[in-house]
Image: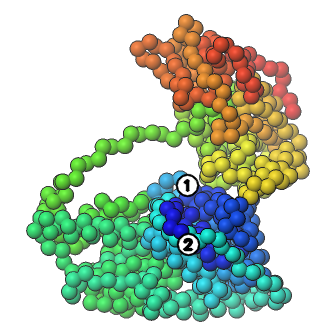
Amino acid sequence: MTKQLVMGNQAFAYAALQAGVRVVAGYPGTPSTELVETVAKLKKQGVAHGVHVEWSTNEKAALEVLAGASYAGARCLFTCKQVGLNVASDPLMSLNYVGIKGGLVLFVTDDPGPISSQTEQDTRRFAAFAKIPVLDPENLEQGYAMMQEAFEISERYHTPVIVRPTTRVCHASTYIDVPESTEARPAGTFEKDPKWVIFPRRSFQAHGEVNERLPRIADEFSDGERGGTFNPIEDHGEGPRLGIMAGGVSAAYAREALAIIERRAKAAGAKVPAYRFMQVGLPYPFPKAAAERFADGLEQVVIAEELDFVLEDEMLRLAGRTHAAWAVRGKLDDTMPGRGENTVDAFVVRLAKFLGVDEKAMAAAGTDRPEPPALPVRPPVLCPGCPHRGSFYAVKQALKKLGCTDAVLSGDIGCYTLGNAAPLDAVDTCLCMGAGITMAQGLGIAEPDRKQIAFVGDSTFFASAMTGIANAVYNGHDITVFVLDNAITAMTGGQPHPGTGLRLSGERSQPISIEAVLRALGVTCIEHAHSFDLGETVEAASRAIAHEGPSAVICEGLCVSLSKPKPALHVDNDLCRGCKRCITQIGCPAIGWDAEGRRAFVNPALCNGCGLCTQVCGFGAIVRPDDAASGDGAATAAPTEATKGGEASC
């Protein structure tokens, strides 16, 4: 063992490997991604022996792969972010009834804020819905222990188990003892048994087994060593009448806030009343016996948790069932924040008020720390040189050329969601992965005279888009799908996918052709275009949009993380007319405005020389060094030429 500084998700990976995990599968999504990547890296380095690790095509596929491996006795680990669990919910709901053999742990990360997600969905609610245990770590040290314990719970009770860290735990860092090597547990064999087949009669019987085991798990984690480890109760002072219950990383925030309150109160000559503190590390099944011990003798209990009021609901239910005299306060009465991430500073104010500590004295004692400056506002934008910028701009130009200025552009989840921002203004809807394609069909039914455009990325195409395309072909919907192929899963850090011809392990595989899949699904009008060639993309888009029925355009251009930068462009001040077209049309962050000289300029530190702006400028004022155009398909024609063309056809 050697002590090493690791990121949170890396620590969870080491914990799973030490627990003997045999199969690891998932789909990338911040803040969960690094766990799978860490396992793959350690396997490649010869540290993790006997483990199989993969990025599956989506979360449903990943969980079903792991269910099969678990039936054969392998310890398995699933990874996704909170919204990814929705995709995996179909197998998950049945899997709890069928049961497992080898330990099956679901590492599902929640994203308060949200920082990089569509929603603030709370996985603890999903765990209760699916009736499977969930562990909620306060910090990395506890999370490391919980990950290993989760495999034991899973095998002891024949149930999947969720480990639910939030963003700040996943992306924190700590020192842990790193093993020199790990060995996966042997998988065993699959033994045929009627219990693996989910029929209604078996489901009814299994539901009873699920209901019977949940109280046993709750009791196990209410008493004894496990209860004290994951659901600890601490008294601060004699005869407390006030209680603070916290879950997940909020327990760490609350501890720090309470230390600050005590320090400031002491400095101000104020007194902090006695209180009792409980961390709930197993929110479902709720450890009722431990919670009753915690609440015994208290008058008020405040709940500190992120996202939903899960613990608050449980305590209110417990109070009603036992006719308790203590009152419960939290999100429901605005004692605690109702949304977003919790912070230590917010807890200092709210917990001080709950404890009845003099607020003025607290404020005076806290003035020794200067107020930090406000962070600069930076709206999210597509990277300089992003191929999606050219695709979006070309589609808008093609629609203008065809007179379809009222078309609806349905977006999707990925980097290209940023196409909704000005000046591109090219994304009108975004719901979830793959939904742009099917939503475009619904919009077309409601408004048959409006053109319907859908955007999807290459990774999302394989993850969630194919059923929607099949539906469009089957039902004859008149939509045009633009597959924005940048050869990578860019938004979550550059993972491979089935179309890249590369596996997570680094091995080559046969790339799946997007065009071949589209043709197999029945799409007959398929165009190709280079995203950085404005004229070519406008022509291809025009032909596909004019086609009656389902059509597609595959817009190809490497993500900037994969492409070698070309020499930065620059503005010829003698040719620049100050029209701002380059700024107001494509919104590249590398292009700025010199107010004094009333001219555009290119920031060479940001420009990667993609050449899109040279095609937008009507005066030829943006040029390459030495006026030499490089490759990668960048055109130099003026916009008037780029949008010319004959009758659109496919």
Residue 136, percent across and down?
49, 74
Quick one: SS at disc 2? loop
Out of 620 and 127, give the one closest to the viewer. 620
Up the image or down, 283 lies above or below 610; here it is: below
Left/right of residue 479 with respect to residue 385 in the rendered view: right
Residue at the image point whose x is 31% and y is 60% from the top? 346
Up the image or down, 610 lies above or below 277; here it is: above
Out of 166 and 263, give the one closest to the viewer. 263
Residue 617, picture quadrant? top right
Q: Label 2 crowding class (10 Å Cα cut-off): few <14, some 14-19, many 20+?
A: few
Confirm or deny contact between disc 1 and disc 2 (CB under 8 A): no
Residue 1, percent across and down?
55, 72
Residue 544, percent across and down?
80, 34
In the image, what residue type sits under mark 2?
Answer: Met
Residue at the image point whose x is 53% and y is 53% from the top? 116
Quick one: SS at disc 1? loop
Out of 139 and 641, give the one closest to the viewer. 139
Left/right of residue 484 with respect to residue 550 in the rendered view: left
Residue 636, percent across and down?
71, 18
Residue 85, picture quadrant? bottom right
Residue at the image point whose x is 62% and y is 29% from the top? 608
Residue at the image point whose x is 62% and y is 50% from the top? 493
Residue at the far top: name it: 574
Left/right of residue 473 with respect to residue 283 in the rendered view: right
Dot 1 or dot 2, earlier in sequence: 2
Marker disc for residue 1: 2
In the image, what residue type sits under mark 1?
Answer: Gln
Up the image or down, 444 lies above or below 211; here it is: above
The residue wearing badge 1 is 118
